[in-house]
Amino acid sequence: MSTLLERINDRSATVVVVGAGYVGLPLAVEVAKAGFTTIAYDRSAAKVDGINAGKSHIEDVTTATVGALVDRKKLSAATDPDVLAKADAVVICVPTPLNKTKDPDNSFILDAADMILARMHPQQLIVLESTTFPGFTREVLLPKLSSTGLKVDKDFFIAFSPERVDPGNKTYQTKNTPKVIGASSPAGLEHAVALYRSYIDKVIPVSSTDTAEMVKLLENTFRAVNIGLVNEVAIMCGRLGLDSWEVIEAAATKPFGFMPFFPGPGLGGHCIPIDPLYLSWKLKTLKYNARFIALADEINSAMPEVVVVRVSDALNERGKALRGAKILIAGVTYKRDIDDVRESPALDIIEELHKRGAEVSYADSHVPFLKHGDLTVPSATLQQAGQFDCVVITTDHSDVDYRALVQASRLIVDTRNATKAFRREHREKIVSL
Ligand code: SAJ
């Protein structure tokens, strides 16, 4: 009987990826391409049926790719957790949101762990990719899996490898994005590195699972804090009568010691607004207050309100009240050229405008239908911009003709510098963040 390491090295191992979302499906595809028998487990029958029919439900993965791997019987999908009994390696790629009180919600990982431990057998490698707080793998996941009586580093191995998927990024995708891996022991690291080296170009081993967990949180805290800084710069420039975009673009000409971030309507997505709060939550349990994280969260969370006040002031200056005004939100996804509205600041802006009595519609070619809480937001087209008192550009999709939008609009509040080229010519109707 070959060992687990041999089965990984000769690709005869079976790999189960738990969670076929924007992280799990691209990963499963690369694992299958490397030659492993790969099963994408997901509780969504729609996703599973789609994959088994050779279709992709993730924009960064083509249907042709999924279809070819399914035809070659390298990739399949299942809603039955019993597939985990066949797994030599399991990679967990499930969501780790915050709950209502902005505390970590690791319930998806714990549900996955329950499924795994009910079917665990000797000689398995378990890798967690879902973002979590430093210490979770060692303090929570490992004891849970050890409750089976199986011994870590003897019967099974455990590792943490942070996901680095940037949805919509055409340059860096799963295979060519360097991957950090930490394990509970040198043997665990050897197994995890052997697996990941088979389908990722560059693997970066680190000394522990805690270290790997912290690497991920530093990456995204770095972004959240720097975005918070430039959002405050935008507020300061507003008071100074300066164009924050012009200031930042000029600062970005410095060839060293500066990295540009840009102000926006707030922080969206399921990583940047959330990951830093996993870190500050953990440090709170150690009686430390992570002030940069708290301040960045405060500033970033306040940006939708800053935008709403900008809209209200711009209408007021034109003798129009916000109440009863017709407003078109141009772009509602959390960043350009994707279809994801999760945590999008546009939703907060729509909600607040609605609360203040404005009539709000949206236009976004990536989002055919938009519901926020009980509010179904009417959709319109950008060609109808002239029918609105104000257009708010909250996402700067590349497929928009901004010249035409400026010409058609009576008033534009631009939170993304999308109308930069036309601001001088149409100064009277373009207000920037
Ligand atoms: N944002 C700004 N100003 C900026 C950059 C971003 O307001 O200068 C806003 C975006 O509009 C968005 C939010 O922040 O609402 C998050 O944007 P993001 O560019 O960080 O995009 P995400 O959330 O898709 O982040 C992912 C992350 N990937 C992983 O966590 C694996 C992040 O680490 C990547 O650095 C990021 O993509 C990326 O570089 O695009």
Image (cartoon, rainbow, N blue to C red):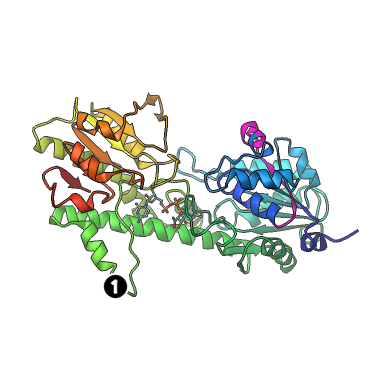
| Residue assigned mark 1 | 254
Q: Residues within 10 Å of mark 1 (few under 14, many from 20)?
A: few
Query: Is 165 on the left-hand or right-hand side of 406?
Result: right
Q: Residue at x 20, y 35 (%)?
A: 390
In the rendered image of this protein, does residue 116 appear above or below residue 137?
above
List x then y, in percent, for residue 363: 33, 34
Out of 193 and 356, give the one closest to the viewer: 193
List x then y, in percent, for residue 381: 31, 32
In the rendered image of this protein, does residue 205 appear above or below residue 52?
below
Tell me where the magenta segment starts and ends, as one range: 34-49
List x then y, in percent, for residue 417: 26, 51
User: Which quadrant of the figure has residue 310?
Assistant: top left
| Residue type marked 1 | Lys
User: Which quadrant of the figure has residue 317?
Assistant: top left
List x then y, in percent, for residue 412: 20, 41
Magenta highlight on residue 136: no
Query: Is 78 on the left-hand or right-hand side of 98?
Result: right
Out of 131 and 337, give the one closest to the viewer: 337
- Farthest residue to the right: give it: 1
* Residue at disc 1, secondary structure: loop
Q: Residue at x 47, y 50 (%)?
A: 168
